[in-house]
Amino acid sequence: MKFADYITVYKQKINEAIKSIWDSKIESIKNSFLKDYYSEIRKYFLAGGKRIRPLLCIATYNAFKEEKDEKIILPSIGTEFLHNASLIHDDIIDKDDFRRGKPAFHFRFRNYHEKYQLKKMSPSDFGNSIGIIGGDSVFITGLEAYLDNEFERDLNLQAINKYEQAFLKIINGVLIETDMVNRKTLSIDDYIEMVSLKTGALIEKSILIGANYSKADSKSCELLSVYGINLGIIFQIIDDILGSFGDEKLTGKPTDGDIREGKHTCLLIEALNKSSDLDKKRIIELIEKPEMSEAEVQEVRDLFQKADVINSCKDLANKYYEEAQNALDKLRLKINNSEMEFFEDLLQFVYNRSF
Amino acid sequence: MKFADYITVYKQKINEAIKSIWDSKIESIKNSFLKDYYSEIRKYFLAGGKRIRPLLCIATYNAFKEEKDEKIILPSIGTEFLHNASLIHDDIIDKDDFRRGKPAFHFRFRNYHEKYQLKKMSPSDFGNSIGIIGGDSVFITGLEAYLDNEFERDLNLQAINKYEQAFLKIINGVLIETDMVNRKTLSIDDYIEMVSLKTGALIEKSILIGANYSKADSKSCELLSVYGINLGIIFQIIDDILGSFGDEKLTGKPTDGDIREGKHTCLLIEALNKSSDLDKKRIIELIEKPEMSEAEVQEVRDLFQKADVINSCKDLANKYYEEAQNALDKLRLKINNSEMEFFEDLLQFVYNRSF
């Protein structure tokens, strides 16, 4: 089954499971501010998202099953909570008030504050405070996916273990990225380590949680793990390219953010490794400025082009694509054809995406 | 066994268990920034704290055991992680740079930033960012107390369930408190609901996690639950009194913070309920000011005294003290004498404390 068909079959069911968790919270609460708060979280969750992580969990579960069942839908949404929680906290840290054209979670509460003229706190402090708490709510509520479902307790405890590991890896990835901004010399290996943690781990664990519930053998889990981490790495490489050279109308993301933040994207690392000493010096000079003009952002982009970094990064993505495909090939006889098609199609989609 | 004796017997062991979790993280990491980060978390954890929550968990476990064992020490530390995680996030939200005379977690990283002259982020933003991530690290790592210990998986899953419930209740309590600042009329019942969630729930769940591991009967759990929530309520009432009328040298906490923040402490609520219309108007006028002078803070304190609120709040604490003692009396024949003594002694300690 193609990735798009999987979306058609499962996305609505995934959304229903997400809704039911927040609905039960909203219903059980009397306090009107708490009702507003949980309603806003619910709205935030349902505002968009392809649900790649739950879909990967479901597909992996199905890959090993002779007969499909829907027990997996509830536990599949756990990592989607973790993903959203980390977006909520990241947007506060990065001071991003919008994500994919929609208000960030903390920004929604800044507006709430302005509307109700709350006292004793500035709108911005109020928004950030509710954002910090909001991320916490979402992180911990994700555990409910594993605490009350139709699977054995043993499997649920394994799933929680993976949820915890994924969370710790994301945190380590974000910390390494924060520290990277302050370092002068960086290799592509450092970058790959960082994105494996920041992006790869959660995709990998979403897959392994599905494998856990279908009791897949350990050799298959190893191969799935390679596929998952590499899928995450490719996703991030392409994200970096689109973040400076994408079509804003398609990505919903401004193409100057990464450059202004001095983010150590694969583009920047490749540019620093491949440019002449003079160009390299100029790039560093530009990205270290606390504020950059539009012309300066464009100058960095031009220097990236001069070093032909898009092609280098595509080559890099290609290397991980081949490794992921290789892992899939070894899985071919062990998993159902329909899910094999899903995994291959998703790999192509992530590699070729322009949004 | 008295509370102080329990500290003597167990505090070192609790600290060893906490250390071992952070040490294993520090050892497994190569990246130097991550090493600094986890070392700082470890230092923060070991800087102080009476470990009331782990002690309550251990004592409850022991209360139902004919022979004691040390299996409970590792799972007992889970709620201490949750407690510290919420302090880390609260200190960012409340902009408290110190806690009990020591630098808050986010403030440590503000200093780190200044020392290493990191780029692209102000020291304050850097401190807050690492603080947000730091709280996340701590509350997810708390799960390790239940993921790898000597108990049955079934009991561990129950413990995780209680950890999740406690976390959600703390969050709801903090949100209700945030919203309270914006409300004009408040009853003591609203206050009790808020502190039951914010402070009572984690104490209650620490106890119930101990009861869970010793497989206590459900009637005992109900009584323990009443004891725990009431202990939390008393703790918070006394905390409010000490927060405006305590001895800073003993509490390590300035006595103007709550008044300046316009926090809806039991003192303020009682003062608004008991004062003349004129005094009430003046109190509201003062606490709604964005900035208060020292003289204005003292004026609020004087108006509190005029309304005799310390005694009203002590009476309030007394009511919950009696309920807690009542629950203990009903437990007397079901639990060991040694732990009965611990519970009674702790109740008195929390009620009578001046620090």
Image (spheres, coloured by chain):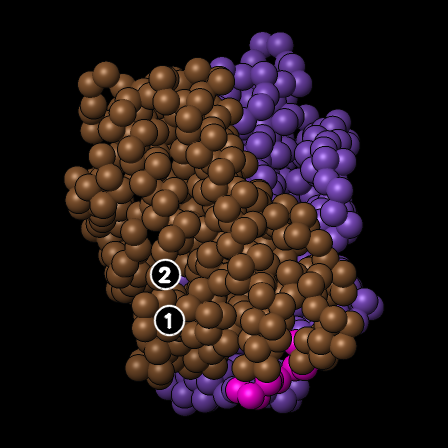
Chain colours: A brown, B purple
Please state the chain letter of the residue tagged with numbered disc 1 in the rendered image: A
Residue A183 drawn above or below residue A67? below
* Residue A215 at x, y percent in the picture: 38, 17
Please name whichever residue, A325 or A307, is drawn nearer the observer in this view of the structure. A307
- Looking at the image, which residue sits at the far right? B115
Residue at the spot x=43%, y=80% of the render?
A: A123
* Residue A95 at x, y percent in the picture: 51, 72
Quarter of the image where the C terminus of chain A is located: bottom left
Asked if residue B234 lies left or right of residue B118, the reply is: left
Q: Secondary structure at mark 1?
A: loop
Residue A349 drawn above or below residue B115? above
Amino acid carrying mark 1 in the image: Asp
* Residue designated by label 1: A247
For residue A354, the mark is 2
Q: Secondary structure at mark 2?
A: loop
Q: Which span is picked out in magenta?
A: A287-296
